[in-house]
Amino acid sequence: MTEPVIQVAHAAVGYDGRAVLRDISLTVTAGEVVAVLGANGSGKSTLIRAVLGLVPLGAGSVTLFGTPQRRFRQWHRIGYVPQRLGAGSGVPATVGEVVASGRLARRGVLRPPGRADREAVAAALRAVGLADRAGDPVATLSGGQQQRTLIARALAGRPELLVLDEPTAGVDAASQEAFATALRDFRDGGGTVLLVAHELGPLRPLISRAVVVHQGGICHDGAVPEPAGHHAEPGHDHVHPHCDEEPAGLWSM
Ligand SMILES: Nc1ncnc2c1ncn2[C@@H]1O[C@H](COP(=O)(O)OP(=O)(O)OP(=O)(O)O)[C@@H](O)[C@H]1O
């Protein structure tokens, strides 16, 4: 059996002594595309930050590629796209430069970029449909294109696991499609994905499993919930994961 890529066991996480998540257990195996769903403030971002060690655990454990997180050093195996970073943020970098920064964990800061670096950057730009924008300042791109730039930066490191926090939030339809294609290629190449999402949109067919966070715990781990009621109307692909209030049928495929 293959080693789980992510293993969370009985984790508790909070801020300033206030519990956000308690007794969370979650396993993600190689090749899975797992969506973390839940209402605003339910703790989705907190869960993935805890997986990456960006917020400390109050209890329990996280294992990455079979290594306890506190001893894990192979961060080049993981690509992370945080929520709404805004790649522009006052930095006059070009799209190509931002994506190339995704190679740093691979090559080290002191070694100049080689052919493998240049190829990885070019492939990542192609994957998100921005090959023709490499020389443009990031600040001149739309929000969706900036988000695609960040995804390309994560892909450029050739990670085995991609962790994405609401990658398509506020992103235009073209960018969503481009992102879905990039994610499909990544998965087809053997990659594993853990992503937070509100609206699955074109990502929906790619999701192999959904985890719903509710009231500090995981209340559903399995099939992707179908949009229900008015959320099933055309153009409204909003998953409302109020586990205990919704009829059981919501969760059937
Ligand atoms: N750095 C922080 N310090 C203190 N509290 C925080 C911090 N980050 C998040 N929280 C709180 O933890 C709770 C969960 O936040 P989190 O961002 O994980 O939720 P979320 O499910 O990702 O929400 P959203 O869908 O709005 O992005 C919220 O009550 C939030 O206010």
Image (cartoon, rainbow, N blue to C red):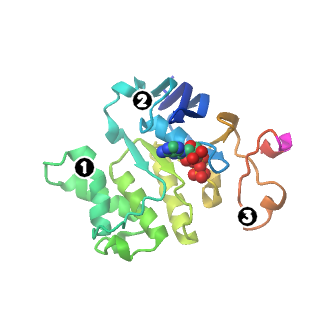
CA separation, marks 2 and 1? 21 Å
Which residue is drawn at the image coordinates 45% and 69% (left, top)? 145
> In the image, residue 21 lies at what x, y percent?
60, 34
CA separation, marks 3 and 1? 39 Å
Local secondary structure at mark 2: loop
Label 1 near label 2: C-beta < 8 Å? Answer: no
N-terminal label among 2 and 1:
2
**Mark 1 surroundings: few (<14), some (14-19) or many (≥20) residues within 10 A:** some
CA separation, marks 2 and 3? 36 Å
Q: Which residues are magenta?
A: 245-249
Whether residue 193 is visible, yes or no, is no
> In the image, residue 23 lies at what x, y percent?
61, 26
Label 3 near label 2: C-beta < 8 Å? Answer: no
- Quadrant that contains the C terminus: top right
> In the image, residue 58 lies at what x, y percent?
50, 26
Which residue is drawn at the image coordinates 53% and 41% (left, top)? 46
Q: Is residue 153 left or right of residue 143?
A: left
Secondary structure mainly formed by the magenta segment? loop
Q: Is residue 25 left or right of residue 129?
A: right
Task: Specify the label residue 60 is tagged with.
Answer: none
**Mark 3 surroundings: few (<14), some (14-19) or many (≥20) residues within 10 A:** few
Disc 3 residue type?
Answer: His
Mark in front: 2 vs 3: 3
Whether residue 50 is visible, yes or no, is yes
Task: Specify the label residue 65 is tagged with.
Answer: 2
N-terminal label among 3 and 1:
1
> In the image, residue 146 lies at what x, y percent?
42, 67
Disc 2 residue type?
Answer: Phe
Label 1 near label 3: C-beta < 8 Å? Answer: no
Task: Specify the label residue 104 is tagged with.
Answer: 1
Of residues 130 and 238, the one drawn nearer to the viewer in this rendering: 238
The verdict on residue 246 being magenta is: yes
